Amino acid sequence: MTGPNGKVRDGVILCGVFTVLIASLFTPLSILTIWFLPLPFFLYTAKHSWPSAVPPAAVIGVLTLILLHPLWMIGVVFAAATGMVMGAFYRSSSSSGTDVVLAGLVAGAAVLLLGLAAAQYGFGVLAEFQRLWQEQWDLAAEMVQNSVPDASVPPLPPLAAVLPLFLAVLTVPTVLLSVWAGRKLLIRFGFPDKRLPPFHRWRFPRSFLFYYLVSCVAALLFDAESWAYSFFAGSFMILDILFAVQGLSFLSFLLHRKGMSRGWLWFAVLALFIPPAAFLLLVLGILDVGTRWRERLERKR
């Protein structure tokens, strides 16, 4: 049912399910449920369209402001925006599963960055994050020194350097798990199956090379003690990880092309912990993104 009554009914269900998910964050179940916050908005938008999802999102936002701290609005807007964008792309007949995931990643990262900026402006949260970060680091250092008295503990990394990684850790699993669960439910409603391509077919956009170069150059332009340097250095680290994943995808492509078992790929995963091999995997990923190496190999088959 997609008429007015169906939209109202599904909107009430959306509000109820999302309220349960928020409540679960105060329980041990939060380790699981936090990754599925966009799911209700994703399902609703895919069924009805994103304008129809705005009223339920507004109701949830008002209830959040009344019942919880205003900072919780960042989580609500993150879940709503990410879910609605993914749902809108899933609803579109011209989009693929890759489009759905990439749209969710971009929307989620943008909301978290804007939310963090707003929280810093209104509440000065970065100072509190820095304090908590220092406390946890000191606690970990104390545990290491108690276990191994002669062990040296590295200095605390700047908060700005770990923020991009923190945003990635929060956004990527949330988007992937929400799409995975939502896709299974939407198929039951008669929607087409939109999924990510097999791992050996993964190709990150060439624009990643541009971002990689910008992050590298920007990190060189700023002072090592500045927030800008730490932020771009953190972004550079995330792109390093992505290109390493791309290198693994290319190796998977070679294994698939030769008809070999993908179990061999585990040796490459273990190589990530060996610096020279990890560097070669990074270079392989960069070449795979920036060249037509795969296409040439395909033509030689």
Image (tube, rainbow, N blue to C red):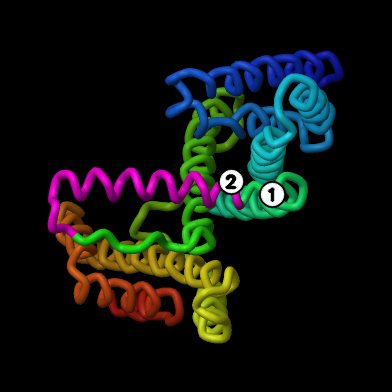
Q: Is mark 1 in CB contact (under 8 Å) with mark 2? A: yes
Which residue occupies the foreground of this view, 5 or 259? 5
Q: Nearer the viewer, residue 278 or 156?
A: 156
Which residue, given by chain and number where applicable, does mark 2 sit on? 128
Mark 2 residue type:
Glu
Q: Position of residue 194 (x, y in %)?
A: 53, 43
Query: Residue 37 location, x and y as percent?
Result: 59, 31
Residue 236 in the figure: left or right of residue 42 = left
Dot 2: within a 10 Å radius of its alpha carbon, few (fewer than 14), some, or many (20 or more) residues? few
Left or right of 52 on screen, residue 86 = left
Q: Quadrant of the C terminus?
A: bottom left
Residue 82 location, quadrant: top right
SS class of the residue under badge 1? Answer: loop
The image quarter in which residue 41 lies: top right
Q: Is residue 134 left or right of residue 41?
A: left
Q: Quadrant of residue 160?
A: bottom right
Q: Residue at x 47, y 37 (%)?
A: 177
Q: Quadrant of the N terminus?
A: top right
Query: At 18% across and 68% down in the image, what residue appears?
Result: 274
Q: Which residue is mark 1?
A: 124
- Is disc 2 placed on a helix, strand or loop? helix
Q: Is residue 189 visible?
A: yes
